[in-house]
């Protein structure tokens, strides 16, 4: 389970790195936004995701959108607060079958940029917070899904992060980890014609590094 992550990366650098991987970023009105640093993104916060301009042709580019973290499925008609499911994570083992996620999995994949994610270990009341980063890559992307719902209190666009069994480093702290895509897999994940099940795997040994983290000292 991943319920906290961070994103601290300038927009122009993000655009350069995506273009290097065959995914040009198409900015709204052609203007590069000034993305504020978000060192601690929590459920229901708005955060950036990148979704294809044309899902049938990922090479056409991606657009950045600020969406609510915690997917509200398209069929939810009550207020957002009345949704009982948190929706921040979707298990890769069931994402293709659960009503809340299966349509988004089939039609609305996105990339969730991050610079770190956080997990906790230890007994209740005395937990240790751990920060995970990707070795050699200050920016990485989670496999994500997004959706749009016309709720009683207005339209809401939201997203979820896929999780899987943990790799060697994450397993020391938690029994799940977010799906972190290799850069060479970004375009594949967005391509609706591709079989993406092979991408939904734990991180290999040495990909992640963990350090104890103190919010007070951050």
Image (cartoon, grey):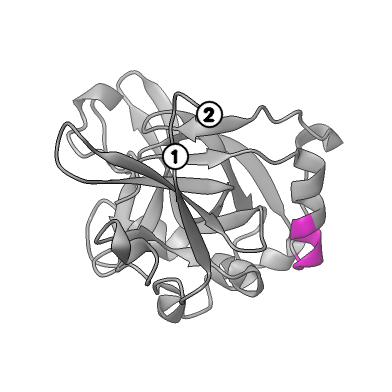
In the image, what residue occupies the spot 67% across and 63% down? Answer: 136
* Disc 2 and disc 1 in contact, CB within 8 angstroms: yes
Residue 153 image position (x, y, % from top left)? 34, 18
Identity of the residue furthest to the right in this view: 30
- Determine whether, in the image, residue 1 is placed left or right of residue 10: left
- Determine whether, in the image, residue 154 is placed left or right of residue 30: left
Q: Which residues are magenta?
A: 17-22
Q: Earlier in the sequence, mark 2 or mark 1?
A: 1
40 and 93: which one is in front? Answer: 40
In the image, what residue occupies the spot 39% across and 72% down? Answer: 202
- Determine whether, in the image, residue 147 is placed left or right of residue 16: left
Q: Is residue 26 visible?
A: yes
Disc 1: which residue: 213
33 and 73: which one is in front? Answer: 33
Q: Main secondary structure of the magenta part?
A: helix
Disc 2: which residue: 218
The picture quadrant where one finds residue 61 is: bottom right
For label 1, the crowd category at 10 Å Cα-Cα, with few meaning under 14, some 14 to 19 and many 20 or more, is some
In the image, what residue occupies the spot 82% across and 43% down? Answer: 12
The picture quadrant where one finds residue 172 is: bottom left
Q: For numbered disc 1, what is the local secondary structure?
A: loop
């Amino acid at each position: 389970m991943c319920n906290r992550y961070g994103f601290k990366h300038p927009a122009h650098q993000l655009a350069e790195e995506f273009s290097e991987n065959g995914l040009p970023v198409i900015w709204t009105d052609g203007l590069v936004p000034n993305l504020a640093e978000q060192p601690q993104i929590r459920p229901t916060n708005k955060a950036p995701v990148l979704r294809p301009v044309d899902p049938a042709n990922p090479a056409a580019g991606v657009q950045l959108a600020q969406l609510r973290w915690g997917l509200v499925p398209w069929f939810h008609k009550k207020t957002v607060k009345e949704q009982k499911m948190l929706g921040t994570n979707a298990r890769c083992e069931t994402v293709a079958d659960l009503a809340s996620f299966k349509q988004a999995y089939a039609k609305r994949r996105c990339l969730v940029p991050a610079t770190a994610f956080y997990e906790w270990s230890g007994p209740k009341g005395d937990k240790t917070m751990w920060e995970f980063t990707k070795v050699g890559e200050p920016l990485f992307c989670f496999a994500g899904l997004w959706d749009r719902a016309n709720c009683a209190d207005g339209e809401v666009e939201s997203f979820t992060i896929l999780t899987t069994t943990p790799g060697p480093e994450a397993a020391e702290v938690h029994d799940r980890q977010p799906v972190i895509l290799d850069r060479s897999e970004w375009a594949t994940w967005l391509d609706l014609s591709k079989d993406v099940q092979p991408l939904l795997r734990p991180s290999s040994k040495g990909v992640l590094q963990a350090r104890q983290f103190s919010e007070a000292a951050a």
